[in-house]
Amino acid sequence: MKIVAVTACPTGIAHTYMAAVELKKAAQQLGVQIMVETQGAMGIENPLSVQDIGRADVVLIASDIEIEHRARFTGSKIHCVTIEDVLTDPISVIKRCEAFSQA
């Protein structure tokens, strides 16, 4: 299972980066490959390439705001959650992505 994710919050400071860390930890615990792009106060960091997106089983958007360059995910399976979802139960978020990818 391969997930690409984008995290973003309204201020683009703490929660954006905390969510990225939590997703990586949860994915590792579940044996899932994940790449996380952050869209924060520093701009886009760890940008996802066209190849990364094409190889992913699901795109996870963890955001409370509209993300930049969303059109690049057109044609992909996209699962959207809030930043709070990720911060409170990242394992559940990853498991929902797995289920979503198989639907």
Image (cartoon, helix red, strand yellow):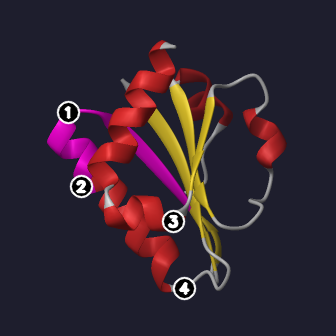
- What kind of residue is marked 4? Ile
Can residue 2 be seen here?
A: no
| Quadrant, the N terminus | top left
Closer to the N terminus: mark 2 or mark 1?
Answer: 2
Q: CA distance from mark 4 to mark 2?
A: 19 Å
Q: Is residue 44 above or below residue 52?
A: below
Kind of element beneath mark 2: helix
Q: Mark 1 or mark 4, which is nearer the start of the sequence?
A: 4
- Is 60 magenta? The answer is no
**Which residue is disc 3 drawn over?**
83
User: Which residue is painted at 48% across and 77% down in the image?
Assistant: 15
Marks 3 and 4, how far apart at CA = 12 Å
- Residue 30 belongs to the span the image colors magenta: yes
Residue 43 vs residue 3, the one in the foreground: 3
Amino acid type indicated by mark 1: Gly
Instruction: Name the residue tied to disc 1.
Output: 31
Which residue is denoted by mark 2 in the rendering? Answer: 25
**Crowdedness near tag 3: few (<14), some (14–19) or many (≥20) residues, C-alpha within 10 Å:** many
The spot of residue 60 in percent (x, y) is: 54, 43
The label number, if any, that marks residue 65 in the structure image: none
Magenta residues (range): 25-38
Given this view, does label 3 or label 4 mark the residue nearer the observer? 3
